[in-house]
Amino acid sequence: MRDNERVTSAIREPETPAATTPPRLIATDLDGTLLRDDKSVSPRTVAALAAAEEAGIEVFFVTGRPARWMDVVSDHVHGHGLAICGNGAAVVDLHGGPGAHRFVKVRELPRNNALEAVGLLRDAAPGTVYAVEQTYGFYQEPAYPKLHMEVPDDLAPAEDLLADGSPTTAEPVLKILAFHPEMEPDAFLTLARLAVGERATVTRSSPSALLEISGPDVSKASTLALCCAERGISHEEVVAFGDMPNDVEMLTWAGRSYAMGNAHPDVLAAASGYTVANNDDGVAVVIEQLLNGRI
């Protein structure tokens, strides 16, 4: 999000007991956080990530992006090679490179839940259009705007795409994308959460009125917690970074968390600290200070 007041002063360190716990894992969002606005990873950030891994701190990319969009960081997945994609819907091994990734864990959106969410949101916000994100496939309604640089596998109403016997039944549904051409983004998010209730998790990461609908209790935070539990890492040993509403749960869960200087107001409120903006290498700034023992 680019229209919020930027925080460009020195980083603010969390004033919590976790701030004195040595980190074992860094969890960072990508767009608006680790990546600059031109979608590049700066040389400073590349060096900081490598230094963290060299120091024995695992780095997890935790993003709303689908696995097929992870080529932007595939050269920087040191060691384990894992990333959390689709807002927690999948854990992906990126070692194979673009197009050859392996799904390690999938937390799908049940089709009945997806159909209920689509219907309820159509009633609550007429004019909403949808796309269906799967492990490998991408389908959309004819009126869904070209928000992504890819050609959909098929065009059809969401109800048809999610029906039994449709082309999508061969793969799990990771999330539904819901776009409204007129509503204000945060108002659309609030309305959708009220309409959908506990049938699914609704969040957003785009500056437009584009919502991301995942399975119940599926979030960046819940999947990151599963990955950390498998490694014997506690939440106090995690340092997290983010900038948009889909990062709020992760930033709240982590022992130390930093909102970017360009972050959404809800993220600034949720994080225990803040750093400078993504274009100023805010993630690298914090990692450098962590490794130097200055914070």
Image (tube, rainbow, N blue to C red):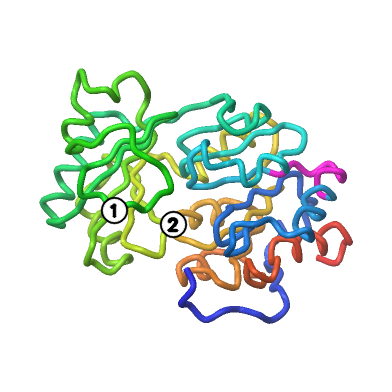
* Residue beneath the point at 78% across and 58% down: 43
In the image, residue 249 sits, relative to residue 213, either above or below, namely below
Nearer to us in this view, 148 or 270: 148
Disc 2 target residue: 205
Disc 1 target residue: 145
Q: Is residue 55 magenta?
A: yes
Q: What's the amino acid at mark 2?
A: Ser
- Pinpoint residue 58: horizontal percent, then vertical percent: 74, 41
* Residue beneath the point at 29% across and 42% down: 131
Disc count in the image? 2
Local SS, label 1: loop
User: Counting other residues with Cα less than 10 Å from the Cα at mark 1, is it few (<14), some (14-19), or many (20 or more)?
Assistant: some
Q: What's the amino acid at mark 1?
A: Pro
Residue situated furthest front in the rendering:
151
Quadrant the C terminus occupies: bottom right
Local SS, label 2: loop
- Pinpoint residue 293: horizontal percent, then vertical percent: 87, 61
Relative horizontal placement of residue 219, taking residue 15 as reference (left or right): left
| First in sequence: mark 2 vs mark 1 | 1
In the image, the segment drawn in magenta is 52-59
